[in-house]
Image (cartoon, rainbow, N blue to C red):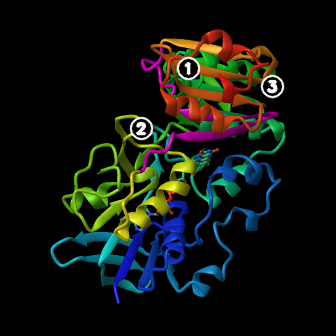
Amino acid sequence: MPTFVIAGASLAGAKAAETLRDEGFDGDIVLLGSELERPYERPPLSKGYLLGNDSRDSVYVHAADWYADHHVDLVPGVTVTAIDRGTATVTTSGPAGDAELSYDKLLLATGASPRRLDFPGSDREEVLYLRTIADSERLREAFQPGTRVVVAGAGWIGLETTAAARSAGCPVTVLEPQPGALHDQLGPELGAVFAALHRAHGVEFRFGERAVEFRPGMVITSRGAEIPADIFVVGIGAAPNDQLAARAGLEVANGVLTDAALRTSDVNIFAAGDVANSFNPLLGRRVRVEHWANALNGGPAAARSMLGQSVSYDRVPYFFSDQYDLGMECAGLPEPGRYDQILYRGDPATLEFIAFWLSGGAVIAGMNVNVWDVNDDIQSLIRSARHIDPARLTNPDIPLTDV
Ligand SMILES: Cc1cc2nc3c(=O)[nH]c(=O)nc-3n(C[C@H](O)[C@H](O)[C@H](O)COP(=O)(O)OP(=O)(O)OC[C@H]3O[C@@H](n4cnc5c(N)ncnc54)[C@H](O)[C@@H]3O)c2cc1C
């Protein structure tokens, strides 16, 4: 009976296990995870769960009895510490000590970890990160009316956390070394829309400025400013958990390198989710996508590949966010330097619009803000890679399917 081992028990890993069973695999599936929780989804941790609107039960990928019911051996609290590719075994470390486990196929779904700050005071207990359920609960407890919050980073995590803190009645200052919010994710034009949204909710931004020290009650910035802070939330990005793969001699560069079938440089080892830097045939390049949908779809794609099916993982990257009353979905990768034009359907000032990023006349990314049921059509536009008539694209009377 073959054994498929999955390192990392979160969304990508749990969805891979589900697909293996759905596809009829009747060998052993061992799902190993460092965390003590069973697999859960992280988006609520900076939104509904942090705000206290979502229950704990709602964040889990599967019901507690799903794993036993589907003969998936979920082992929480156990970390894979080494891979021996010669003998096809992994070494694990957990409460019962070290152990070895043989695999026929191995999936790396080890995700990413928050980048950490390292300066005087950065190890104090008031300095908080957000990746796990426990982190989210700790923040929720800290966000009391009047608690002064400083946030490092105007990326997605930083801004969603800022919205939650403001909703809880905390004054918030955001420090961001880049010239604007979401600069690397959306570029300056749409970043400005999000900065305006937060300013309208009373948030102070300090762009071009970073934290250099934390002292009890204050953050010191690179410009020498002393900003009152009861807590300091760090949201400066995440790094792939690819050290295990690197130690095993797999090809690693900003994540575990895979082909379009999510196969690593070892034919028996696969990678999916935040840790994978995979060749996307649609984009014609490798991308490491740290988004929920990539874990949701990448885990199953890797599972099919492990079963020997022909897989070409060519999804349009997709992301969503909720901040205050703004809900949005974004398809494609609108990074600065990759687009030469932005067109709008609707007025961004109304916070009900669609933005399109174009390159050479073709749509490469699109974001619907408080407009729903259009993201599939935006993805079709991106897939088509055709030159688009700007007048038709921006005309709200023409359905996107007819553009
Ligand atoms: C607070 C927050 C909010 C987010 N909001 C959004 C959102 O709104 N929209 C969106 O698209 N995306 C969002 N994301 C991103 C999304 O959650 C991630 O892309 C997704 O969680 C990736 O899933 P994964 O399974 O690849 O990795 P992870 O979720 O990182 O899970 C990897 C798991 O592997 C474990 N692990 C690591 N190394 C080992 C090892 N050696 N052995 C065993 N286990 C190991 C880790 O402990 C972890 O449990 C958010 C992320 C966070 C943190």
Q: How many angstroms separate mark 2 from mark 1 (CA)?
A: 17 Å
Looking at the picture, which amino acid does disc 1 mark?
Trp
Position of residue 94 measured from the top left corner of the image (x, y, whole percent): 42, 79
Measuring 76% from the left and 17% from the top, which residue is drawn there? 346
Position of residue 199 measured from the top left corner of the image (x, y, whole percent): 75, 20
Q: Quadrant of the N terminus?
A: bottom left
The residue at which mark 1 appears reads as: 357
Q: Is residue 335 magenta?
A: yes
Q: Considering depth in this image, is 145 or 168 the residue closer to the camera? A: 168
Residue sitting at the far bottom? 1
Q: Quadrant of the C terminus?
A: top right
| 197 on left or right of 359 | right
| 278 on left or right of 191 | left
The residue at which mark 2 appears reads as: 282
Marks 1 and 2: in contact by CB < 8 Å? no
Q: Considering depth in this image, is 11 or 90 the residue closer to the camera? A: 11
Ligand 1: does it lie within 8 Å of the C-beta at label 3? no
Looking at the picture, which amino acid does disc 2 mark?
Leu
Numbered disc in front, either 2 or 1: 2
Q: Considering depth in this image, is 221 or 21 the residue closer to the camera? A: 21
| 18 on left or right of 322 | left
Q: How many angstroms separate mark 1 from mark 3 (CA)?
A: 27 Å
Where disc 3 sits, the SS reads loop
Other residues around mark 1 within 10 Å, as few (<14) / some (14–19) / many (≥20): many
Where disc 2 sits, the SS reads loop
Q: Which residues are magenta?
A: 313-339
Which is nearer the N-term, disc 2 or disc 3? 3
The residue at which mark 3 appears reads as: 201
Q: Considering depth in this image, is 383 or 284 the residue closer to the camera? A: 383
> In which quadrant of the rendered view does residue 401 lie?
top right
Q: How many angstroms separate mark 2 from mark 3 (CA)?
A: 39 Å
